[in-house]
Amino acid sequence: MTVLVTGAAGFIGFHVATALLARGDRVIGFDNLNTYYDPRLKEARLALLRESPGFRFIRGDVSDRAAMETVTAEYPDIQGIVHLAAQAGVRHSLVDPYSYVTSNVMGHLVVLEAARRLKGLRHLVYASTSSVYGANTAMPFRETDRVDTPVSLYAATKRADELMSHAYAHLFGLPQTGLRFFTVYGPWGRPDMAYYSFARAIVAGETLTLYDGGLLKRDFTYVDDIVAGVVGALDQPPAAGPRVLNIGNHRGEEVRELVRLLEDALGKKAIVRTAPRPAVDVEETFASIDAISALTGFAPKTPLLLGIPRFVTWFRQWHGV
């Protein structure tokens, strides 16, 4: 199968592309290699993907209609799309809101338009986020919950993507699955994520900030488990209508436990300050995964206790620690 992976040089995109190549698929990687974080990390991921003869790379921005039309014209045999390209980061949406609308809303629309013109397309899988649950307090979060109370622009753009996808499925019969990711972590991760920035602070002997004393809870999900769910969902296109699925570890854990595990793996104590929770942060995330488990057999295998040491092993190698 020929699969277009947008955001292929990104954290999750790199791991998904690697898994697809390993099973024999041809992967068309698409990424703009932006500078939201150190592009050397993206280039290093891309270099590993280029080692596979089944990988092709095109540099471009998903919000650029001409660039996406070039991809579909050059590879009309694309049968699957895994759309992961986006402007990520909840807090950064307070700094540069325009980039979120450009990348996440216009970018998603461009992908939808390209997808509906691919005659052999079987399935479009795209990234949503647990952030769409916003101010919800009932746990675990279920796909049937109302999601009309976002607390960040990032969440609002991702909810807009889900609504646009629903419209395109209704109007054009486009088979789609949106995946609401829950706090993905692991090797080759994003430096702006809390676990990564905490590790850097601990190693450097710098102070790290824990909001509400580290009592906030997150459904930390190891990247290998995420990849299994993404590929499993890709292989199961919906028979009718669009769908949205949670993909998480089905376990809310305190952020202070994350810090403790990082301390153990790095062999060094953290210097901690506490601060009130920012308005864009929620108290807890916790995924119900009944739907994706029933569809694909998805069963997360990596608790935080195992995943953090694996991340730290890679972190030491990458940073020469």
Image (cartoon, rainbow, N blue to C red):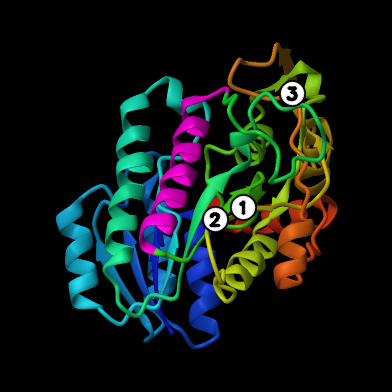
Q: CA distance from mark 1 to mark 2?
A: 5 Å
Residue 29 in view in this figure: yes
Q: Does residue 130 lie above or below 7 as drawn?
A: above
Number of numbered tags placed on the structure image: 3
Amino acid bearing label 1: Phe
Q: Secondary structure at mark 3?
A: strand
Q: Is residue 153 magenta?
A: yes
On the image, numbered disc 2 is attached to which residue?
A: 318
Q: Main secondary structure of the magenta part?
A: helix
Query: Within 10 Å of the Cα at label 3, are there few (<14), some (14-19), or many (20+) other Cα atoms?
Result: few
**Badge 1 vs badge 2, beta-carbon distance below 8 Å:** yes
The structure residue drawn at horizontal position 45% and vertical position 27%, both measured from the top left corner, is 92
Q: Earlier in the sequence, mark 2 or mark 3?
A: 3
On the image, numbered disc 3 is attached to which residue?
A: 271
Q: Does residue 289 lie above or below 100 as drawn?
A: below
Residue range of the region highlighted in magenta in the rendering? 151-172
Q: Nearer the viewer, residue 11 or 198?
A: 11
The structure residue drawn at horizontal position 61% and vertical position 57%, both measured from the top left corner, is 187
Residue 50 lies in quadrant = bottom left
